[in-house]
Every structure is written in C-alpha cells, then in structure tokens.
Amino acid sequence: MTRETSVQTEIIRCGWCAGNDIYIDYHDKEWGVPLHDDRALFEMLILEGAQAGLSWITILKRRDAYRKCFDNFNASKIVKYTEEKIQELMQNEGIIRNELKIRSAVTNAKAFLTTQKEFGTFDNYIWQFSDYKTIVNDYSDLREVPATTPESDRMSKDLQKRGFKFTGSTICHAYMQAVGMVDDHIQLCWKRKQPEHLLLDL
C-alpha cells in the first residue's frame, strides 16, 4: 500500500493584511496592480485623502458608501456639489464625517478636471511620476518600506501646486502603491514581481 502525503502550500502575503478578509481581498486583487482608468484613479486619490490619520481598513469598510455618496466618483458631478449637498454628506454615517476632507473632494474634483483637460487624461499626468512604469522595489520586511520617496515628494509638490488638497508626500506614496505605480510587495509575498535588476537575460 502506498501512503500519499498531501502537502498544503501556505500562501504568504505582506503582513499588513494578515487576519482580515477585506484587507486580504484588497491586497490580492488591487494593491500594486497598475491602474489606468481616470475615474478609478480619482477614486483612489479621494479615498487616500480620506484615510489621512486613520487606518486604511477604516476606509475600505466604507468604500461602497463613499461610491454611493460621491456619485461613483464622477468628478464632473462632484464639482457641482452645493453647500446643501456638503452638509448632507456631513450627516452621513457611512463615510468619514470630516468637513475638510469632504470639501477637499470638491476642490480636488475641480483640480482633477483641469489637469485631465491639460494632459488629455489624468492617467497621462499622474504616471509621469513613476516614469510611466511600475517601480518594483526589493524589500524583505515591511519595516524597510519608506513612508515617502523622492517620487512621492515630487508628486505631492506638483499636486499641491495644482490646487489638490490632502496630497502630502505620505499620502502620495500610499497612492502610488495603491494604483500600481509602485510595487512594494515584500520578497516572500506571492504577489511580488521580480525587480528588473534581478531578472536574468534569457
């Protein structure tokens, strides 16, 4: 009789998403995946700003509510929000009821549309800060991942010059990770791509 031994392969992920199904789903399907749709890029910019001072899971749990409250992040609709609409959002328990953050969504929608018009797409504009490619880093531990980078510093400075709010360098770096401009999956993570300098010429 032959004894068969089944080996269960453990899926290794970046430690920040451990133990939470919402985080795991986001990590596996979105974080570090290149994003080029203007509406989705605008959504992530607003959500990253809303996250300032809070944990990302706090925002992910409210993501559907944000989409409903902010017209699925249609910038052309958000720029038309009246004071009455802003006060209505301030009473909505489904989102973060921070007046500065809510008002910044309207401000950022205006800046977004202006930038979009100038560059043809917001995608053309924002990806310039990673030289139009994903920057794949080579970290073995989450503690090695910086909060800011020279690229996020440049992005932050330019966004703020264009009138965007809640776009400090830390937020910009998190944004770059979220939309796949930067791939910071650690070495052992199953989602990690090989940095160019580690790839062999075949």
Image (cartoon, rainbow, N blue to C red):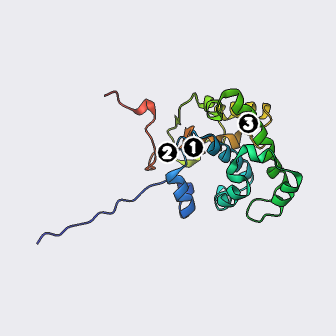
Q: Earlier in the sequence, mark 3 or mark 1?
A: 3
SS class, disc 1: helix
Q: Residue at x 68, y 40 (%)?
A: 172
Give the side of residue 84 with respect to residue 132, left or right.
right
- Nearest to viewer (mark 2 / mark 3): 3
Q: Residues within 10 Å of mark 3 (few under 14, many from 20)?
A: some
The kind of residue tagged 2 is Ser
Q: Which residue is mark 1?
A: 144
Q: Residue at x 86, y 51 (%)?
A: 82
The kind of residue tagged 1 is Glu
Q: Where does the image place residue 61, in percent across and percent down from the top left?
A: 65, 62
Q: Is residue 34 visible?
A: yes
The kind of residue tagged 3 is Leu
Q: Which mark is residue 140?
A: 2
SS class, disc 2: loop
| Label pair 2/3, CB-CB below 8 angstroms | no
Relative vertical location of residue 21 with respect to residue 171 in this rendering, above or below? below
Of residues 37 and 132, the one nearer the viewer is 37
| Label pair 1/2, CB-CB below 8 angstroms | yes
Q: Which residue is mark 3?
A: 113
CA gap, disc 2 and disc 3: 39 Å
Most extreme residue toward the right, as rendered? 83
